[in-house]
């Protein structure tokens, strides 16, 4: 458990560098990320490199005992490169080149830009790959930020045609798979196929889905060029990339297959304001952020790396104060930067790195706070980062402490399956304007956390053998392999599976699954879906549970024919809202919070898992033999995990934005 910071020596007077480095070390910072936007300073003119300033800045950080996370600068190609090769630019859906003047102005499919990316990556890796200060590498920065995954350039057009030919072999096979007989959309050759953009009305859904798959594969290929070079010239050092929140434009599991550590950029207040929360939730959590938004992503990114690196993840950018990019940018309450930091450690983060060391007084991000103000004075975020560093040392949870071995160990018995192709399917054909697959996934996750359950968010290919409860809130893709593994898991014990609506509804070409939904999951769920309805805002159906309690259903509803399943809860018209079939549970609609909690409480009990009725906005996380208790509410809360526990930090009484850490006895 260590702290880091993002630093831009090229943006500050060189006479400040040594003082900055000394203050970082004194604050408790151990990792410093640099140079992800520095291409124009590294190579000010084509082929002429200026390494001197970067050599000196790295030497200064190294002299202070700091470890450098070196970045490839490919997120911001310089003006001279764009002018020499305008075809490298991405093209938007309106045919407009996404020009120079901000960042991420390149097309993943451009062969010339891939070559330039490899060239600058190799130059930086050769220069610093063996430097003793360089402990890790970051590729590029925030792939896809500003909606830059999908490009409609000529390079993307040609790349898509080649991708389709490799997948389908013959155009007749493609026509059949897509169902191109509809509306006379059949093709005679792959060379006739354009990107699915600019059509009169909705482009063919299978066409759009394959374009999403192609674009995702382009991100994977682009990233792999860099990881291969970095491993060649800097062996033994971790390679990472910083992912984003609620971002689904490419398959993160595929990109992470080439990484040692997954990292992500955590901005709880910005995500609270900009995404799907209700207006009341945005007001309620304006200064704290929704408590489950950081946790959801912590568990998502902890689940990306597999094999020898299983569970390894960092926060590369932690919000330290108000940001600049959300619709509204409130300042966090005092104590929230500390609480967010500890929340990340509670979910297994190896490093929490703050963005940024000092607020910039110029350019696009000048309103984005740092640990310091532009005048070099310490801001509130810096005070709280210092406090966390002191607490880590005081209670023995720093990198040399007794919990270090548990930093990446998952104690979760609950797996939530997140499948990017399924998300794309729902986004392409939502059927209802407000059907958001990430929202229903998040709502299910939040209900699990409110019941005190730790959760691993995993891919559809993950090994599920260690889980007692597997939840699939939005798995639209028919997945016979996953269905077989779930059936085997249930046959071996008491493992339970919970399916959300639309499960298994679509085949790989975004057509109806064979035999009607839920397709390959039908034998497990014991139902067949007869008809679906998307519900407009304000249309809510009551759901009655066996104990007489009520919940509600919105957004989506299905009428099902039971094939062995028994209704557990019903709508007022008597039709099933939730059904159980052996060890499987199926929701025919979009439950509210109470509905999810009713369903998960029963499924968890059947799986042998104990749930808790946690106080509102209180969250707990277990990491090894430590329990972290976090109070996101505006009220004082009394809570202790068990009687046989030692309180390392805090107390049973948690103030608003308060934290307690408990060490359990070995027998618990």
Image (spheres, helix red, strand yellow):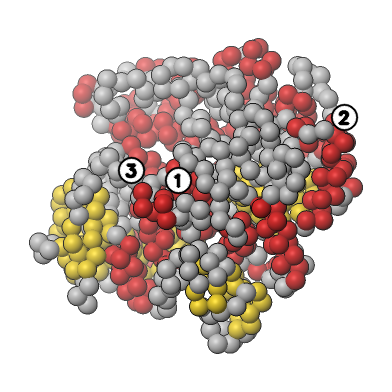
Q: CA distance from mark 3 to mark 1?
A: 23 Å
Number of the label disc, if any, that sits on residue 52: 2
Q: Is residue 264 left or right of residue 281?
A: right
Callout 2 crowding tier (Cα within 10 Å): few <14, some 14–19, many ≥20: few
Q: At 48% across and 65% down in the image, what residue appears?
A: 633
Which residue ends up furthest to the top in the rendered image? 84
Q: Is residue 54 left or right of residue 238?
A: right
Q: Is residue 56 visible?
A: yes
User: Can you say which quadrant of the picture contains the C terminus?
Assistant: bottom right
Secondary structure beneath dot 1 equals helix
Callout 3 crowding tier (Cα within 10 Å): few <14, some 14–19, many ≥20: many
Q: At 73% across and 24% down in the image, what residue appears?
A: 40
Residue at mark 3: 426
Disc 1 and disc 2 in contact, CB within 8 angstroms: no
Disc 3 and disc 1 in contact, CB within 8 angstroms: no
Instruction: Residue 343: give x, y in percent of width and height.
Output: 58, 62
Q: Of label 1 and label 2, which has the lower sequence position?
A: 2
- Front-lying residue, 642 or 284: 284
Instruction: Residue 94: give x, y in percent of width and height.
Output: 41, 19
Instruction: Residue 656: give x, y in percent of width and height.
Output: 53, 66
Number of the label disc, if any, that sits on residue 233: none
Number of the label disc, if any, that sits on residue 273: 1
Secondary structure beneath dot 3 equals helix
């Amino acid at each position: 458990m260590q702290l880091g910071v993002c630093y831009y020596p090229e943006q500050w007077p060189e006479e400040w560098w040594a003082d900055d480095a000394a203050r970082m070390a004194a604050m408790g910072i151990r990792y410093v990320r640099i140079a992800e936007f520095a291409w124009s300073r590294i190579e000010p003119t084509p082929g002429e490199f200026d390494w001197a300033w970067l050599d000196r800045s790295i030497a200064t950080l190294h002299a202070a005992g700091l470890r450098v996370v070196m970045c490839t600068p490919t997120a911001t190609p310089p003006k001279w490169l764009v002018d020499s090769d305008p075809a490298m630019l991405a093209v938007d859906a309106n045919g407009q080149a996404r020009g120079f003047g901000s960042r991420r102005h390149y097309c993943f499919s451009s062969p010339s830009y891939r070559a330039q990316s490899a060239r600058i990556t190799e130059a930086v890796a050769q220069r610093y790959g063996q430097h003793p200060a360089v402990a890790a590498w970051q590729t590029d920065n925030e792939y896809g930020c500003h909606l830059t995954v999908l490009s409609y350039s000529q390079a993307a057009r040609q790349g898509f045609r080649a991708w389709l030919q490799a997948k389908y072999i013959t155009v007749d096979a493609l026509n059949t798979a897509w169902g191109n007989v509809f509306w006379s959309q059949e093709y005679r050759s792959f060379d006739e196929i354009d990107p699915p953009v600019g059509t009169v009305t909705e482009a063919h859904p299978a066409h759009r889905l394959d374009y999403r798959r192609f674009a995702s594969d382009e991100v994977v290929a682009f990233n792999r060029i860099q990881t291969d070079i970095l491993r060649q010239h800097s062996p033994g050092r971790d390679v990472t990339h910083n992912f984003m929140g609620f971002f689904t434009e490419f398959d993160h599991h595929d990109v992470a297959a080439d990484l040692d550590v997954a990292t992500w950029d955590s901005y709880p207040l910005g995500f609270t304001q900009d995404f799907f929360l209700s207006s009341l939730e945005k007001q309620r959590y304006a200064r704290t952020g929704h408590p489950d938004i950081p946790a959801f992503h912590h568990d998502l990114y902890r689940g990306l790396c597999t094999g020898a690196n299983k569970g390894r993840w960092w926060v590369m950018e932690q919000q330290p104060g108000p940001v600049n990019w959300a619709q509204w940018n409130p300042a966090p309450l005092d104590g929230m930067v500390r609480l967010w930091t500890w929340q990340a450690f509670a979910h297994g983060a190896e490093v929490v790195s703050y963005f940024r060391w000092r607020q910039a007084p110029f350019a696009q991000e000048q309103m984005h706070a740092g640990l310091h103000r532009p005048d070099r004075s310490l801001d509130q975020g810096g005070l709280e980062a210092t406090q966390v560093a002191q607490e880590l040392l005081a209670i023995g949870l720093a990198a040399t402490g007794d919990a270090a071995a548990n930093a990446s160990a998952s104690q979760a018995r609950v797996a939530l399956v997140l499948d990017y192709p399924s998300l794309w399917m729902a986004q392409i054909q939502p059927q209802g304007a407000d059907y958001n697959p990430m929202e229903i996934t998040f709502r299910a996750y939040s209900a699990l956390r409110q019941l005190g359950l730790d959760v691993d968010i995993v891919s559809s290919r993950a090994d599920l053998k260690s889980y007692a409860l597997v939840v699939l809130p939005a798995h639209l893709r028919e997945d016979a392999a996953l269905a077989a593994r779930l059936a085997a898991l249930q046959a071996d014990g008491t493992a339970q599976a919970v399916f959300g609506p639309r499960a298994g509804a679509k085949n790989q070409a975004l057509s109806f699954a064979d035999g009607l939904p839920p397709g390959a999951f039908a034998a497990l769920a014991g139902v067949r879906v007869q008809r679906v309805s998307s519900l407009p805002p304000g249309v809510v159906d009551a759901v009655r549970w066996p104990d007489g309690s009520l919940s509600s259903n919105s957004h989506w509803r299905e009428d099902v024919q039971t094939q062995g399943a028994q209704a557990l809860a019903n709508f007022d018209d008597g039709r099933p809202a939730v059904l159980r079939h052996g060890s499987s549970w199926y929701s025919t609609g979009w439950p509210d919070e109470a509905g999810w909690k009713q369903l998960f409480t029963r499924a968890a009990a059947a799986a042998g898992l104990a749930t808790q009725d946690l106080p509102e906005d209180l969250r707990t996380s277990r990491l090894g033999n430590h329990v972290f208790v976090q109070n996101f509410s505006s009220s004082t809360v009394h809570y202790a995990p068990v009687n046989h526990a030692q309180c390392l930090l805090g107390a049973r009484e948690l103030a608003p934005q308060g934290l307690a850490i408990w060490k359990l006895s070995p027998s618990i």
